[in-house]
Structure formats: C-alpha cells, structure tokens
Amino acid sequence: MGDGDKQLVWVGDSREKLMEFPEEVKDSIGFALGYAQSGEMHPDAKPLNKGKLKGKGIYEIVEPYDGDTYRAVYTVILKGRVYVLHSFKKKSNKGKETPKPDIDLIERRYKVAKEIHAELEAKNTNFIKKYLKKYLGKVKQ
C-alpha cells in the first residue's frame, strides 16, 4: 500500500467469504480493490444504485468464473478508507441483479461501516481493539 492509499476495512464476514472464492477470482477482486484503495475505479466496478443504496458511493465487482458469478461490494465514500461490505457467490442464474437478501445485508453493513468509521476517526482505542478481536481474531498489545 502506497502512502496515498486508503486503508482497507472488512465488515462482517466479507473477508472470510472472499477467501473461499477460487484463486483467480480472489486475484481479480483483490486487484479491483487495489484500484479503489488508490482512489481509482476499476473498469469492472459498477455503482450499486438499488433502493436505499443509491448515491452512497457503493460499488460492486462482478467476476464470472466457471459458470458461477462472484461479487464483492465496497464503499469509498467514508474518508480515507475502503470498506468491503459483502462478498458472495450469486446463487441464482436468473438475471444480473443483486438479490434482495444481499441488498438488505449490504444496507445493514453500510450502517455498521459508518459506525466503525466514526470510531476509527475518533481514535477510540477500546473500540479498535474490540473490532480487531472480533473481525481479525487478534489484538496487538
């Protein structure tokens, strides 16, 4: 990560789910997230403008692989950070739209990302330790 790059923050199980993807998919999505970290938008990243998500700076990377479709959703609107909100394999082959249960989860995680962001900006060390323990499984002492 370069000096001007944004910090990558994983919300919920988005990182764990991404790690379950095929290697080629992980590489492609990781590359696209790298663009976001450097303040650019990867050509495969598209705004997610469905319902309450419209205008929130939320983007979706769609990666087809071996007959399946893998997706990662992130937001860049919160200063200095890229929040990965959701990673999932689309179960239905019907249509290109993101399924409603996933949209609902993204909405909830966007709210969580705003809370995490406020705490990180306030440098609330107790919150940061809880976050690291919960989402990363370790806390640096």
Image: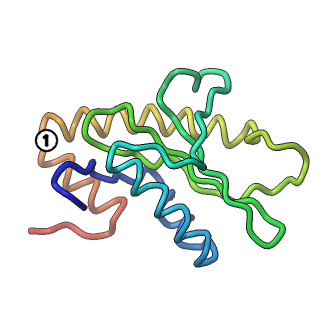
**Crowdedness near tag 1: few (<14), some (14–19) or many (≥20) residues, C-alpha within 10 Å:** few
Q: Amino acid at mark 1?
A: Asn
Question: For the view shown, which residue lies furthest in the bottom direction?
Answer: 23
**Residue at 22% across, 37% down:** 119
Q: Position of residue 129 (x, y in %)?
A: 19, 56
Q: Position of residue 137 (x, y in %)?
A: 32, 69
Quadrant of the snapshot with the N terminus: bottom left
Tell me if 29 is positioned left or right of 121 in this view: right
Question: For the view shown, which residue lies furthest in the right direction?
Answer: 94
**Residue at 20% across, 66% down:** 139
Quadrant of the snapshot with the C terminus: bottom left
Q: Nearer the viewer, residue 88 or 125?
A: 88
Quarter assignment of residue 51: top right
**Label 1's element?**
loop
Tell me if 30 is positioned left or right of 98 in this view: left
Q: Nearer the viewer, residue 38 or 127?
A: 38
Here the colouring is rainbow
Which residue is tagged 1? Answer: 124
Q: Is residue 45 above or below residue 93?
A: above
Question: For the view shown, which residue lies furthest in the left direction?
Answer: 141
Q: Nearer the viewer, residue 55 or 108?
A: 55
**Residue at 51% across, 57% down:** 14
Q: Position of residue 136 (x, y in %)?
A: 33, 65
Q: Position of residue 38 (x, y in %)?
A: 32, 49
Quarter assignment of residue 26: bottom right
**Residue at 55% across, 65% down:** 28
